[in-house]
Image (cartoon, rainbow, N blue to C red):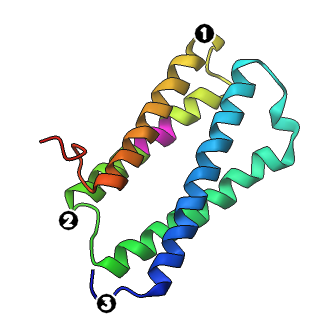
Amino acid sequence: MEGICVDYYLVKLLHVGCVVLSISLFILRGSLELFAQAWRQSRLLRVAPHVIDTVLLSSAVWMAWRIGQYPFVNAWLTAKVLALLAYILLGMKALGKSTPASQKLVYFVAALFSVGYIVGVALTRSPSWGML
């Protein structure tokens, strides 16, 4: 990728760091929810994910612009965006107050699978992870 300089790699490092933090916090919050722990009283666990995810999404948009690849133009970015929407919806159900306890684990595991898919697509830049 000729012409991409240090700023791209610094933003990518920020992006990957936010990915790790975001997934880790989701796993923590999901685990606490599954074990019926009162995590919602923690201001940090309620606010931090929104801040981290804002930086994560902002860095993703900047990188896509910088490399000239866009969702709904490039298949791998389209797959990531659609899987991100699935992850958000599944995560909301997994952590939702109105979701029955008996269904939370299913939504939590499904959300983890979708985020795993997103990471796989990001690493391979292929919606099929390069298997097709």
Element assignment for label 2: loop
Element assignment for label 3: loop
Quarter placement of the N terminus: bottom left
Measured in 3D between alpha carbons, the distance from the residue under mark 1 to the one under mark 2, in whole angstroms, is: 39 Å
Q: Which of marks 1 and 2 is nearer the N terminus?
A: 2
Determine whether, in the image, residue 29 is placed left or right of residue 91. Answer: right
Q: Earlier in the sequence, mark 3 or mark 2?
A: 3
- Circle on res. 73: 2
At x 82%, y 33%, the residue is 39
Few, some or many residues within 10 Å of mark 2 (<14, 14–19, 20+): few
Inspect the magenta stretch and tell me whether residue 91 lies in it. no
Q: Which residue does the numbered mark 1 point to in the structure image? A: 102
Q: Quadrant of residue 93?
A: top right
Determine whether, in the image, residue 75 is placed left or right of residue 123. Answer: left
Q: Nearer the viewer, residue 126 or 114?
A: 126
Few, some or many residues within 10 Å of mark 1 (<14, 14–19, 20+): few
Dots 1 and 3: beta carbons under 8 Å? Answer: no
Few, some or many residues within 10 Å of mark 3 (<14, 14–19, 20+): few
Q: What stretch is highlighted in magenta?
A: 85-89
**Mark in front: 3 vs 2:** 3
**Amino acid type of disc 2?**
Val
Dots 1 and 2: beta carbons under 8 Å? Answer: no
**Amino acid type of disc 1?**
Ser
**Amino acid type of disc 3?**
Gly
Q: Where is residue 110? Give x, y as percent.
A: 46, 27
